[in-house]
């Protein structure tokens, strides 16, 4: 049995692992995709205190090493269900199940997907949610950016230096026929469906908790972007991770 199982190896989860590991707890971090979380897609982070300019990958490599140096184990598996047996939580994954005295939810958010209509419109054309990852594949070609917020604006600015033409459309507009790739920037959503009925979620699926990171279920805490909060950044995710681990 683990003292704490942490779901997600982004900034929130790995900071929680540093704090919990350093206080002598037996810690398992479960990650479904990439060690480091969503910021590994970012080429440049300039606003994390103490580090002037660094790539997301390099920053998170250090954070993961720090967590492991305090004894945290990081394993690749997707969590599909949590069963609350009072003092014991059973965390079910696509690769076995784990028992823990406490669980920290740190699953972050995922890009909001295209509407069915736009997905049908895109047809077989590639759809990307990360211009810095995939933009270079469309050098000299026409592309389209879907979205109307700041992320869409920055996505367009980035692609304008690469593509031959960048169309800009809003959610549900038709996709121009000659665009060879579709870049989607229509916001982010938490992946918390598997928690329905276990902890309180708000109408957008965020896990409801205040600054103490306590969810509505005793023994289950939440940290980072998947928590109800106003500012979703690395530094606030790290802060939550420290608080949640200190509550365990
Ligand atoms: C393009 C971009 C640029 C950004 N730039 C900055 C910046 O410059 N400065 C800044 O402060 N912030 C920036 N942010 C915001 C920052 O990345 C987030 O606030 C931060 O990464 C949140 O950390 P987190 O740990 O809460 O979530 P995440 O980093 O999203 O990590 C959550 C992890 O949980 C995993 N996970 C999810 N569900 C499961 C499951 N069921 N089972 C197992 N694992 C699961 C995910 O795969 C993911 O790795 C940027 C975000 C984006 C998208």
Image (tube, rainbow, N blue to C red):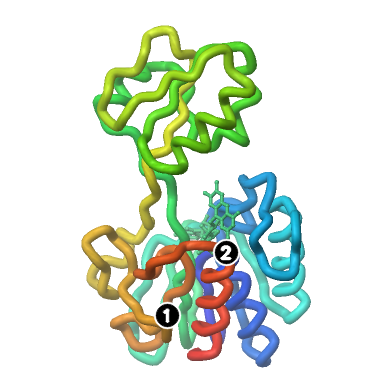
Left or right of 173, for residue 187 = right
Which quadrant holds the N terminus? bottom right
Asked whether residue 93 appears in the rendered view, the answer is no
**What secondary structure is found at the residue carrying circle 2?**
helix
**Residue 183 position in % (x across, y down):** 47, 29
Which residue is at 42% across, 16% downward? 124
Which quarter of the picture shows residue 213?
Answer: bottom left
**Residue 154 position in % (x across, y down):** 52, 37
Placement of 245 over or under 176, stated as above or below: below
Which quarter of the picture shows residue 133?
Answer: top right
Which residue is at 42% across, 80% downward? 221
Q: CA distance from mark 1 to mark 2?
A: 18 Å
Asked whether residue 158 appears in the rendered view, the answer is yes
Q: Which is more toward the observer, 89 or 163? A: 163
Left or right of 64, for residue 123 = left
Placement of 18 over or under 142, stated as above or below: below
**Residue 75 position in % (x across, y down):** 62, 64
**What secondary structure is found at the residue carrying circle 1?**
strand
| View extreme (top): residue | 178
Instruction: Identify residue for label 1.
Output: 221
Give the number of the disc on residue 234.
Answer: 2
**Residue 150 position in % (x across, y down):** 44, 43
Which quarter of the picture shows residue 46?
Answer: bottom right
Q: How many marks?
A: 2
Left or right of 18, for residue 88 = left
Q: Which is more toward the observer, 52 or 112? A: 52
- Does the residue tagged 2 have its C-beta within 8 Å of any atom of ligand 1? yes
């Amino acid at each position: 049995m683990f003292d704490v199982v942490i779901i997600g190896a982004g900034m929130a989860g790995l900071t929680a692992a540093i704090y919990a590991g350093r206080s002598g707890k037996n810690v398992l971090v479960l990650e479904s995709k990439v060690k480091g979380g969503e910021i590994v897609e970012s080429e440049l982070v300039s606003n994390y205190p103490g580090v002037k300019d660094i790539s997301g990958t390099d920053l998170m490599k250090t954070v993961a090493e720090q967590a492991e140096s305090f004894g945290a184990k990081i394993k690749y598996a997707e969590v599909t269900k949590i069963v609350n047996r009072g003092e014991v939580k059973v965390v079910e994954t696509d690769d076995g199940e784990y028992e823990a005295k406490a669980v920290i939810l740190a699953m972050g958010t995922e890009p909001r997907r295209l509407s069915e209509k736009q997905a049908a419109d895109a047809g077989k054309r590639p759809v990307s949610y990360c211009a810095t990852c995939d933009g270079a594949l469309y050098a000299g070609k026409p592309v389209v950016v879907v979205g109307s917020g700041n992320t869409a604006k920055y996505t367009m600015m980035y692609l304008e230096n690469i593509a031959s033409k960048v169309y800009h459309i809003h959610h549900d507009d038709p996709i121009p026929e000659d665009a060879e790739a579709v870049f989607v920037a229509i916001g982010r959503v938490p992946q918390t469906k598997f928690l329905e009925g276990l902890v309180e979620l708000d109408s957008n699926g965020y896990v409801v908790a205040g600054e103490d990171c306590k969810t509505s279920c005793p023994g289950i805490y939440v940290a980072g972007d998947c928590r109800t909060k106003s500012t979703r950044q690395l530094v606030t995710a790290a802060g939550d991770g420290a608080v949640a681990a200190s509550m365990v």
